[in-house]
Image (spheres, coloured by chain):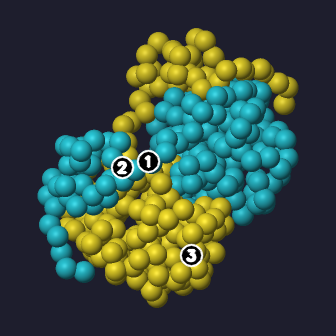
Chain colours: A yellow, B cyan
Amino acid sequence: MNIGSYSYDEYVHVVESFHGSLAPGLLIGGFIVDLALKKLPHGEFFDAICETEICLPDAVQLLTPCTIGNGWLRVLDFGRFAVTLYEKTGGEGVRVYLDMEKLNAWDEVNSWYWKLKKKPEQDYQLLLSQIREAGYGMLSVQRVRVEPEKLRREKLGASAVCPECGEAYPTKHGNRCRACQGESPYIEVTSTLL
Amino acid sequence: MNIGSYSYDEYVHVVESFHGSLAPGLLIGGFIVDLALKKLPHGEFFDAICETEICLPDAVQLLTPCTIGNGWLRVLDFGRFAVTLYEKTGGEGVRVYLDMEKLNAWDEVNSWYWKLKKKPEQDYQLLLSQIREAGYGMLSVQRVRVEPEKLRREKLGASAVCPECGEAYPTKHGNRCRACQGESPYIEVTSTLL
């Protein structure tokens, strides 16, 4: 059983290295993305949608050319465990999701997903082995069509120097940058010498 | 000159492999993140803020343990070319940003950043070599304090099966999932056999 271009064990290693831990969601996510890649017509340019921000975006980033930084991955905060890969121009795509009925057959995964047990009561090794054994067995597939324009990252447009902080910002945000408009997450800022 | 734990050439290779292209912003981003890591007190647990969604988040994901999927990286849509690494609990951190005054000294990088030349008129090799030569020379550093609570990813909370699509979703979103509330990006959905 391979995950993308990795063997299962290689994928486990890559997940630990990139994500910082062997999150069960990223193992399921590996099968989700792998299946979506297999169902997508070969060789086309595609973009990705991830319908949760938890864990799953990292499976997409590790297994496809789509990342947050290059704009080919969009994360929608639906809280659904699903990934869609779709052709950039026409919008034809494949959506793979964790199927709640199929999940029922894998008791340790099911109780992990629905948080039916407290952490110390979970059998982590059983959880991992059920995920591996299940493979595609917890997943279902849909053909979808998306509106690519709706999902395309907005163009940055013209930039200017913010009159308050002196940094470059997109003028579409207004006459100063959003941080200086009150959205800054910083309580204190002190300049330091390099 | 190293970038994180990579040599410069290794970092270039990793960027091409992960991001899909050798984006100049990711090379500058490499120096930004590298400098932030150096200025951060060693060995602490930290989270990351990236103040633009363009390119720079991938530098954070490649060079720190912080990713979109593990929730340690937050992307703020300020359009400022800056990264902050901050201690998870106290909020003390370091912010490194592209300094517009210093950028002036590097004409090809400056004209690339401000889009002063059309693509065919840009000298890509000169751009890359100026970025490499400049290193930290285009950057400035601030000590900052953030409110960690403000930036922490909201807990998923309780989940339920959506009565329309049958998938799991967070009940804090309402009595059905957001996709079924009209936010779905899909025009057509057809179930297929695995």
Amino acid type assigned to the residue bearing label 2 in the image: Pro
Q: Position of A109 compared to B25: left or right?
A: left
Q: Calculate the distance from the C-alpha at mark 2 to the C-alpha at mark 1.
A: 6 Å
Query: In the rendered image, is residue B63 in sight?
Result: yes
Q: Quadrant of the C terminus of chain B?
A: bottom left
Residue B177's spot in the image, x, y percent? 27, 49
Q: Which residue is mark 1?
A: B157
The residue tagged with tag 2: helix, strand or loop? strand
The residue tagged with tag 1: helix, strand or loop? loop
Amino acid type assigned to the residue bearing label 3 in the image: Asp
The residue tagged with tag 3: helix, strand or loop? loop
Q: Which residue is mark 2?
A: B170
Q: Calculate the distance from the C-alpha at mark 3 to the C-alpha at mark 2.
A: 24 Å
Q: Position of A103 compared to A130: left or right?
A: left
Residue A152's spot in the image, x, y percent? 33, 45
Amino acid type assigned to the residue bearing label 1 in the image: Gly
Query: In the rendered image, is residue B131 in sight?
Result: no
Tell me whether circle 2 and circle 1 mark residues in contact (CB < 8 Å): yes
Residue A127's spot in the image, x, y percent? 51, 76
Q: Where is A13 relative to A148, above or below?
A: below
Q: Which residue is mark 3?
A: A123
Q: How dense is the environment of label 3, judged by Cα within 10 Å: few (below 14), some, or many (20 and up)? A: few
Q: Are marks 2 and 1 on the same chain?
A: yes
